[in-house]
Amino acid sequence: MSHSAVNFFQHIKEELDFLENSSKELNDETFYEDEVLKRAFARSL
């Protein structure tokens, strides 16, 4: 795998870890009702 592909997948893993940690206290209802939060999570990836 090329160096750039490894960096790309590492970035995805870091963002997934961040999202997982950031959403531990977040419930589904709050997430689905908050348009800014949904867009921020989507753009993080």
Image: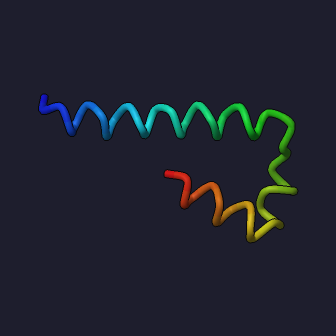
The residue shown at (33%, 35%) is 9
Q: Position of residue 3 (x, y in %)?
A: 18, 31
Q: Does residue 24 appear left or right of residue 17 in this picture?
A: right
Left/right placement of residue 11 relative to residue 5 reads right
Observer-nearest of 20 and 5: 5
In x, y percent, where is residue 30? 87, 56
Vertically, is 45 above or below 37?
A: above
Q: Please, which residue is most extreme toward the bottom here?
A: 35
Q: Residue at x 43, y 39 (%)?
A: 12
Q: Is residue 31 above or below residue 34?
A: above
Pinpoint residue 26: horizontal percent, then vertical percent.
Answer: 84, 43
Quadrant for the N terminus, please.
Answer: top left
Q: Quadrant of residue 33?
A: bottom right
Number of marks in the image?
0
Left/right placement of residue 34 relative to residue 3 reads right
Out of 34 and 12, give the one closest to the viewer.
12
User: Among all residues in the image, which is located at the extreme left?
Assistant: 2
Vertically, is 30 above or below 22?
below
What residue sits 54% from the left and 37% below the top? 16
Among the 4 quarters of the image, the one containing residue 41: bottom right
Which colouring convention does the figure follow?
rainbow
Above or below residue 30? Residue 16 is above
| Residue shown at the point (66%, 34%) measured from the top left | 20
Rendering coords of residue 18 (x, y %): 63, 36
